[in-house]
Image: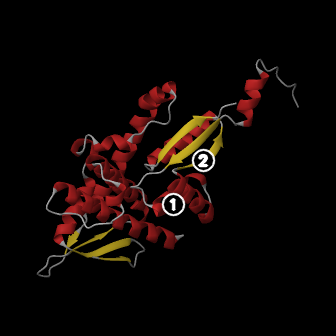
């Protein structure tokens, strides 16, 4: 997979292997639907004050959830624009409009946090000490977390370069 | 200039007016990328890269960093914004 900035100034991922294209498509999954336990991390309490926590649950958390959902809709629409090359390997490419970068960063982060919460990854696992065991669901989820981190790093680098 | 209004509870009102009683704290999270946390600090607080990195490193090494202090309403707004970027942020009342 290659990352670069397109001629129009957008983050562009090309030569994406079909396997990774599938992982990328999973970015649009609804974390609340697919990972009921892990998704609890997405709406943390604002502190220990009981009144504040109640207000937060009533007023702020529904708004935050709407925000995450709308960011995910943006990402899902971009993913529909993925293009497959004609070569025998059928590699894919994805161009992300520069002004969608924050929606992508938020959505990728939400999914990484959700997966980490769902599988209770340790600090050691998350710090890439050992390669994930891809024969297990846990290993595959860790690979996803790491892959999405790579996409985030690329988008952050693009944002920095545009400043 | 109009006459100043009488304050019913001058101590509380002055404290609120000075915006002192609440702090916003960002807690460490092994999943969030360091570069992402820096970006969020710059977006939410309008900080320089250096200041954002200083607080990010404090979160990373000490487990938490106080990123703002002031009135309750503004603290709520900042925590909401930080939660919108999925950082682990809380607000705490400063003991008087």
The quarter of the picture where residue A32 lies is top left
Q: Give me the chain letter of mark 2.
A: B
Residue beneath disc 2: B66
* Residue occupying the point 37% across, 46% down: A68
Placement of B82 over or under A163, stated as above or below: above
Placement of A66 over or under A108, stated as above or below: above
Residue beneath disc 1: B39
Look at the image and tell me in which quarter the C terminus of chain B lies. top right
Q: How is the image coloured?
A: secondary structure
Q: Label 2: state its secondary structure.
A: strand
**Which residue occupies the extreme left position in the image?**
A88
In the figure, is residue B75 to the left or right of B20?
Answer: left
Q: From where the camera sits, is residue A66 visible?
A: no
In the rendered structure, which disc, 1 or 2, sits on the residue that comes first in sequence? 1
Towards the viewer: A120 or A14: A120
* Residue occupying the point 58% across, 36% down: B92
Q: Label 1: state its secondary structure.
A: helix
Badge 2 density bin: few <14, some 14–19, many ≥20, Cα 10 Å: some
* Residue occupying the point 50% across, 41% down: B80
Q: Are marks 1 and 2 in contact (CB under 8 Å)?
A: no
Q: Mark 1 or 2, which is nearer the eye?
A: 2
Q: Position of residue A148 (x, y in %)?
A: 32, 62
């Amino acid at each position: 997979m290659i990352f670069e900035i397109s001629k129009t100034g957008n983050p562009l991922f090309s030569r994406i292997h079909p396997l990774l294209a599938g992982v990328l498509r999973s970015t649009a999954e609804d974390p609340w639907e697919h990972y009921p336990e892990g998704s609890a991390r997405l709406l943390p309490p604002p502190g220990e004050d009981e009144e504040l926590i109640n207000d937060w649950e009533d007023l702020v958390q529904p708004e935050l959830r709407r925000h995450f959902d709308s960011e995910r809709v943006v990402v899902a629409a971009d993913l529909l624009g993925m293009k497959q090359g004609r070569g025998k390997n059928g590699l894919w490419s994805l161009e992300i409009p520069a002004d969608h970068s924050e929606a992508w960063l938020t959505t990728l982060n939400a999914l990484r946090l959700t997966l980490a919460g769902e599988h209770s990854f340790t600090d050691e696992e998350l710090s890439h000490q050992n390669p994930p065991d891809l024969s297990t669901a846990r290993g595959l989820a860790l690979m996803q977390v790491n892959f999405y981190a790579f996409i985030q790093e690329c988008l952050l680098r693009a944002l920095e370069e545009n400043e | 200039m109009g006459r100043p209004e009488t304050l019913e509870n001058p101590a509380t009102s002055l404290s609120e007016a000075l915006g002192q009683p609440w702090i916003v704290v960002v807690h460490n999270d092994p999943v969030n990328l360091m570069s992402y946390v820096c970006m969020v600090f710059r977006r939410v607080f309008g900080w320089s890269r250096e200041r954002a990195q200083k607080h990010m490193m404090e979160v990373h090494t000490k487990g938490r960093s106080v990123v703002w202090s002031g009135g309750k309403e503004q603290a709520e707004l900042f925590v909401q914004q930080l939660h919108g970027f999925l950082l682990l942020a809380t607000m705490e009342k400063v003991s008087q």
